[in-house]
Image: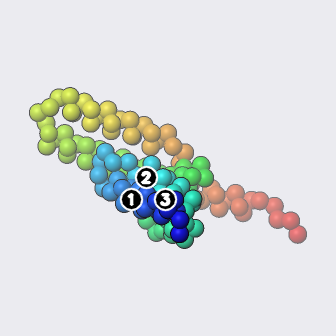
Amino acid sequence: MDVRKAVLIFLGTVCVALGVLGMFLPLMPTTVFLLLAAYCYSKSSEKFHTWLLTNRLCGKYISNYKSGRGISMRQKISTTVVLWASIGFSIWMIGTRFWVTLLLLAVAIGVTTHVFWLKTYRPETEAETIQDTPKLA
């Protein structure tokens, strides 16, 4: 294995770890890190790339996002609820710093806006499209 591939595999693995952390930490992005991991793995290891895209936790999420199908309404709602709950908890705990509160609110509003501007993925409409497609005999 050459050094370039080893570095890309390492960076991809770090990005996966940061993406997973981002699922639980309010100000840590998830999508960016998972997409970076997918890129690093696609350039270095088909095995890791396939693992990431077929992974139970984030495989469909990455595939749908990369293909432009968007994210499901359930993902949008759960992301927003966790975001606002963690931001609210952070504001409550910090409380005394007004500028920090404004910064956290700005981040929450920005992320919420981004999430809801993403296309909403609806698996049932995809299945209907496949069924409505005429078959060539």
Mark in front: 3 vs 2: 3
Mark in front: 2 vs 1: 1
Q: Residue beneath label 1, please?
A: 14
Residue 118 place in picture, x, y as percent = 51, 43
Identify the residue at horizontal 49%, vertical 59% (top origin). 8
Q: Could you tell me the amino acid type at mark 3?
A: Leu
13 over 109 or under it: above or below? below
- Checking the image for residue 33, the label placed there is 2
Q: Secondary structure at mark 3?
A: helix
Identify the residue at horizontal 49%, vertical 53% (top origin). 35
Residue 91 place in picture, x, y as percent = 19, 39
Q: Secondary structure at mark 1?
A: helix
Q: Earlier in the sequence, mark 3 or mark 2?
A: 3
Q: Could you tell me the amino acid type at mark 1?
A: Val
Mark in front: 1 vs 3: 3
State the CA–CA distance, disc 1 to disc 3. Answer: 10 Å
Q: Is residue 31 visible?
A: no
Q: Residue beneath label 3, please?
A: 8
Q: Earlier in the sequence, mark 1 or mark 3?
A: 3
State the CA–CA distance, disc 2 to disc 1. Answer: 9 Å
Residue 34 place in picture, x, y as percent = 45, 55
Q: Are marks 2 and 1 in contact (CB under 8 Å)?
A: no
Q: Is residue 136 visible?
A: yes
Q: Could you tell me the amino acid type at mark 2?
A: Phe
